[in-house]
Every structure is written in C-alpha cells, then in structure tokens.
Amino acid sequence: MNAETLVSHPYIQQILELNRIHDDRAELHRQAGPILQAMGNDAEFLQQVLQRNFDDEGYLKQTWSQYNIPFLYIYENEDMVLKIHFFASHPTHAKGIAAHCIHHHNNYMLTTAAILGSGYETMLFDKNIVTEGNKTKLRVNKHFTQQQYPVHSIDSWEPHIVYLPETYSATLQLWTPDKKRATDSLRHNPLLKAIKTPLRKAIQLLGMEKQFGISVANTVQWYPDGDAFVGIDENEYFAPTRSAVGPDIDSYSIQTVCYFIQQKGIADIPYLQQVLNRPETPAYYKPWLQKLIQGEDIPETFAKTEINIPMKSYTREDVMRAAGYSLP
C-alpha cells in the first residue's frame, strides 16, 4: 500500500475536508481531535498505516538516528502531516524525568491523541519569554497528563516539555502550519527542494521566516538552572543525537515500532511474512518481524537516560523550581 492508496480512506478524507473548509487552523485542530482518536483505536486502519510504511522504499531505506523519535507515517501534503510517534519510558519506569529540553515548534501547531500506554506528562509555558543575560524566565500555563487530556493541542511558538511516560506510549499526531500561506505548496516543489538549504538561508537572512512559514535561523531550547532557565542553541543541543547512527540505532528503532505492533495487536501475519521474504527488506527488520510472526514477545525498548546539557538530565521538580511553580 502507498500513500496514494491510503488517502482514499474515510479518516483521511474527513481530515482533508476539515482542512478545506477551515482556514482557521485552531478550529481545524479542534475538530480533528476525535478523528485522530478514532484512527488510533481502529486496528484495521492501523494495519493499513503499517503497510503504507513497510511498502515504502523511502521508509525502509531511511537512516535512523537517536534524533528520530521512532514513527510511522500516515499522510502528508502541503497543509499537514499525520504521523504516529512512539515514546519509550525510563529503564526504571520512573516518572517526572525530562525527555528533552523545553522547546517550541516554531510556526507549527500540533494536536496529539494518546493511543497506547500510560501517556506522558507535559507542561505548556507562556509564549512571553523574558531573557536577561544568559537567564530566561518561563511561566507554566498548563500542567497535565495524557490520562487527563487524551487529546490536546500545542500552539505555534508555545514552549513546552514532555516527561518520559511511565510505560511505553504512542500518540497519533496532526501537524499543520499556524496559518495557510500562498508559499505552502513550495515545500513540495521538486525544483525548490534541490536548492532548499540556500533558499532557506536567504529567507532567514532577510528576516522573512514567518512570512514563508519556516523556522528561524537560530532556535533556542531551554533547561532549568536553579531559579531560572538557560538557553542552548538547537543545533548544538541536537548535534550528538543527529550523529548517533548505526546498526544498533537501526535495530532499536524497528524494535520500537514492532513492539507497538505487538502491543496494539495489529500484526497481520501473512502480510508480515511477505515483508520478511522481500529481498529489499533491510536485514535489521528481520529478527523483529520473525518474532511478530512466531508470536514471541518483543522486549520493550527504553529511552536514553541522558541529554546534551551540563547536568545530563533534569526532573519535573527542577522545572518547577526554575519557573517558581508549585502543584495546585
């Protein structure tokens, strides 16, 4: 199955119709939430999503890294991206440990539906970011778990943090730019893709990122440091994980995907046998496919315990202290 086949599915058609009639992106996300939940609870649909990925040469041949959250594509066009992301827990299943730095998604809005596991805990911060010297003040606007809000949205430019889930979890996600722009279709223009990097740099040099709907040249993420937060350049922060590639990362990534397949009960054995027998299927897929086919338990994968900041990790309590926030 390819992306063109999946686009005819009623769920995708419903999302596309909402996209057509709602220029207001917030309204689109609000109305899409129940559809995302329905997608995540529909085993037959999820099996089609799996086929859309395992039949895709680009997905099979991608280079996984620690930077990637293991995922499955659902659908993408110039207005939106639909994906499933997988969130591994801490090796001890501890709660309240930061999965990453506090960050925003630039001009992208996100609605996420919890579809497996405990779900994660998150904090959303005020967009009014005050920086003096190397210290930043962030104020917590909302603090909740996915058990409290199985479907929730994160606005463009809204700083937030995710804490590692207590158990392995999965979310089904809708991403869109915060508004429709005449330039949106250019992201899929094959001629412009060939000069994407110099074109992006030119737009950033002119200070026209928001007009074109692209990220700023130097994006900052934050981590707690005493009674305030410290910024770190996004490129510096992600450098170690982007460079962490290789056979172990490949195996970990597909193990994470196959664990979802098993836990969600969507293993289509005849189809998986076909994938296993294909010469183009990467060798690192095959041990996990064999376990699915034979009904053997796939071990749970776990999140890395350190991130690229001076203290290597931090907790909910560290964030609360830096934000001057206390539990209600």
Image (cartoon, rainbow, N blue to C red):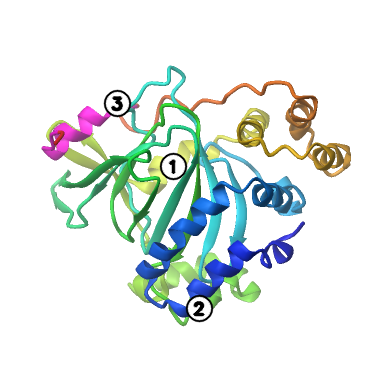
Residue 280 position, x and y percent, is 84, 44
Three-letter amino acid code at the position of disc 3: Met
Q: Crowding at label 3, few (<14), some or many (≥20) Cα neighbours within 10 Å? A: few
Q: Quadrant of residue 162?
A: top left
Name the side, left or right, on which 258 lies relative to 111: right
Q: What element does badge 3 sit on?
A: loop
Three-letter amino acid code of the residue under disc 1: Phe
Vertical arrangement, residue 98 with respect to residue 123, above or below: above
Label 3 or label 2, whichever lies nearer to me, is: 2
In this rendering, position of residue 323 left or right of residue 36 = left
In the rendered structure, which segment of residues is drawn in magenta?
A: 313-326
Of 150 and 180, which appears nearest the observer? 150
Image check: 223 left or right of 82?
left
Residue at x 41% of width, y 47% of height: 235
Residue at image position (44%, 24%) is 90
- Marks 1/3 in contact by CB < 8 Å: the verdict is no
Q: Looking at the image, which is closer to me, 43 or 165?
A: 43
Residue highlighted by disc 1: 238
Residue receiving disc 3: 311
Determine if the magenta segment contains residue 219: no
Q: Is residue 114 visible?
A: yes
Where is residue 160 drawn, in percent x and y? Answer: 30, 47
